[in-house]
Image (cartoon, rainbow, N blue to C red):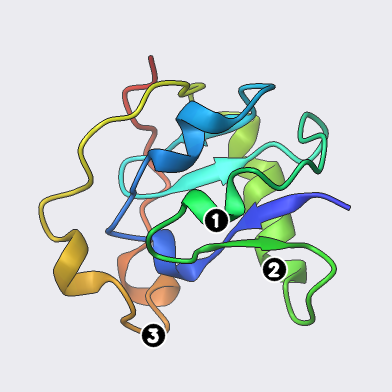
Amino acid sequence: MTYVVTDNCIKCKYTDCVEVCPVDCFYEGENFLVIHPDECIDCGVCEPECPAEAIKPDTEPKLDQWLKINAEYAQVWPNITIKRDPLPEAKEFDGKPNKYPQYFSDKPGAGD
C-alpha cells in the first residue's frame, strides 16, 4: 500500500502534508503535488493534514489512475519538504469535481 494525491489537490496545492512526511516523498508540480509510491512508507500521517482531503490510500477503489500519475510525475518533478502557502485560487477550487482533464499541469514546481 501507498498513499496517493488525487484530483482535489489540483489548483489548491496545500503543502501541510509535506512538512509532516517523515521520508520526504512529496514532489511538486506547478499546480499539484504527488507522492512517490516507492518512497512512501505508508505511515498515513499526511492524509489527515490535507485540508482538501486529496490524499487517499491506494487501497480505495478507482485510484489506479492516480497511482500511475503519482508514480510518473514523482520521477520528474522536484522534491518538496517545506510548507508553503497554497495557490491563490485554492479556496475557489477546493471541492470542485473532475479538475484533472481541464486544469492539471504537467509542468514542474519549484521544489525546495
Residue sitting farthest toward the top: 112
Residue at numbered disc 1:
48
Residue at numbered disc 2:
65
Query: How far apart, in angstroms, are the residues tagged by discs 2 and 1?
Result: 22 Å
Q: Where is residue 5 in the image (x, y as percent from the top left)?
A: 57, 56
Q: Dot 3 surroundings within 10 Å: few (below 14), some, or many (20 or more)?
A: few
For marks 3 and 2 on the same chain, the one whose residue lies earlier in the sequence: 2
Q: Dot 2 surroundings within 10 Å: few (below 14), some, or many (20 or more)?
A: few
Above or below: residue 17 compared with residue 93: above
Instruction: Count the marks.
Output: 3
**Split into 4 quadrants, where in the image is the C terminus?**
top left
Q: Dot 1 surroundings within 10 Å: few (below 14), some, or many (20 or more)?
A: some
Q: Nearer the viewer, residue 56 or 101?
A: 56
Q: What residue type is labelled 2?
A: Gln
Q: What residue type is labelled 3?
A: Pro
Q: Nearer the viewer, residue 101 or 5?
A: 5
Helix, strand or loop at mark 1: helix
The image's mark for residue 97 is 3
For marks 2 and 1 on the same chain, the one whose residue lies earlier in the sequence: 1
Residue positioned 62% across, 35% down in the render: 74
Please identify, in this view, whether the residue under mark 3 or under mark 1 is nearer the observer. Answer: 1
Query: How far apart, in angstroms, are the residues tagged by discs 3 and 2?
Result: 15 Å
100 relative position to 73: left or right: left
Please identify, in this view, whether the residue under mark 2 or under mark 1 is nearer the observer. Answer: 1
96 relative position to 76: left or right: left
Helix, strand or loop at mark 2: helix
36 relative position to 94: left or right: right
For marks 3 and 1 on the same chain, the one whose residue lies earlier in the sequence: 1
Please identify, in this view, whether the residue under mark 3 or under mark 2 is nearer the observer. Answer: 3
User: Residue 100, located in which quarter of the rendered image?
Assistant: bottom left
